[in-house]
Image (cartoon, grey):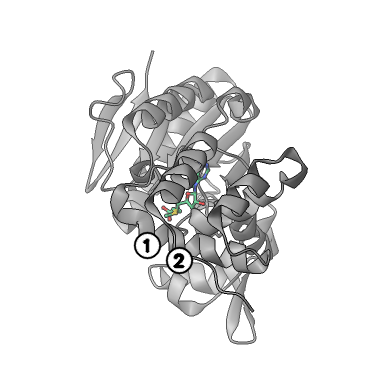
Amino acid sequence: MQTVEKLRNDDYKAIREFVYERSGLFFSDAKLYFIENRVSKRLKSLGMTRYQDYLRHIKSPANADEMNHLFDAVTTNETSFYRNPPQIDAFADHILPKVVESIRARGQRTLKIWSSACSSGEEPYTLAMVLLEKKDLLRGLIPRVYGSDISVEILAKAKEATYQAYTMRNLPPNYKKSYFEPKGNEFGIASQVRNMVQLSQFNLVDYKSYIKFRSMDIIFCRNVLIYFDLKVKRQIIKNFFDCLNNQSFLLIGHSESLHNINRDFKLEHFSRALAYLKSV
Ligand SMILES: C[S@@+](CC[C@H](N)C(=O)[O-])C[C@H]1O[C@@H](n2cnc3c(N)ncnc32)[C@H](O)[C@@H]1O
């Protein structure tokens, strides 16, 4: 079998520009080896040895499906259940009650939460579990959790909803007991949780399609903004603002901030966590 050539700088630049155009993901010069490591596997699967051939292949409309493989290859999907516990606690104990109060004041019947870069599902399933724990607060409302991601491969894992113990390390013990079923050495998500979560592929730079996620009450967009440049971050956050109902919240990763990105949201402080409020 022939080996894949080394990735030259000019081919790296052409690949990263193409990835940026299609996904908003920006790779600095230092990421050449990361991209080479990930994309060379695609060339091998296609029996190709030259990056120029791969670029021609992926740009051809006849091979549109290869785009999904490229997204799978270049994304970083690290996640876990109950990730950043102080933020999930703030969501459960402070943000949710505020949002529910606004929903009831508006006479709204549904509560809609969007996990907008949901990876293998740990985030949206965590949110659904919190909603089940808060069933008294939500009495009379129909809760819905939407999970979306650009990567179809990672979404397939989310749909499978079977996990190893390591990704459950931050979960409170009562959540493990109530919402998982042993499946050999792994753990499957209980159907009452799965049924609340709707998963679909969505590319955050597909700006004209945000209409699918309008009238949200809470949006989670954690640990993905770091991969975008300022222009893309601004556009995504503007779209989130437009998707949210009034008196609704956006939650981003704990190392991320909207400083210099957006001035429409108001920063709200909770004990050991921050969130952004839409209040117009
Ligand atoms: C590091 S994971 C974060 C998962 C989860 N939000 C968390 O904080 O645990 C980042 C996710 O963003 C997704 N992603 C990257 N670019 C995207 C885009 N343009 N549109 C939608 N999702 C994207 C990746 O596929 C990956 O699953």
What residue sits 52% from the left and 24% below the top?
Answer: 243
Residue 151: percent from left, percent from top = 59, 52
Which residue in the structure is indicated by mark 1?
A: 33
Residue situated furthest bottom in the rendering: 184
Which amino acid does the dot numbered 2 rest on?
Asn
Which amino acid does the dot numbered 1 rest on?
Tyr
Which residue in the structure is indicated by mark 2?
A: 37
Q: Is residue 133 visible?
A: no
Is 3 rendered above or below residue 217?
below
Residue situated furthest top in the rendering: 280
What residue sits 40% from the left and 46% below the top?
Answer: 222
Q: What is the quadrant of residue 257 in the picture?
A: top left
- Decide if residue 194 is on the left or right side of residue 204: right
- Decide if residue 51 is on the left or right side of residue 236: right
Mark 1 lies on a secondary structure that is helix
Residue 208: percent from left, percent from top = 60, 23
Task: Give whichever of 154, 82 is nearer the camera.
Answer: 154
* Quadrant position of the C terminus in the picture: top left
Residue 172: percent from left, percent from top = 41, 68
What residue sits 61% from the left and 75% below the top?
Answer: 2
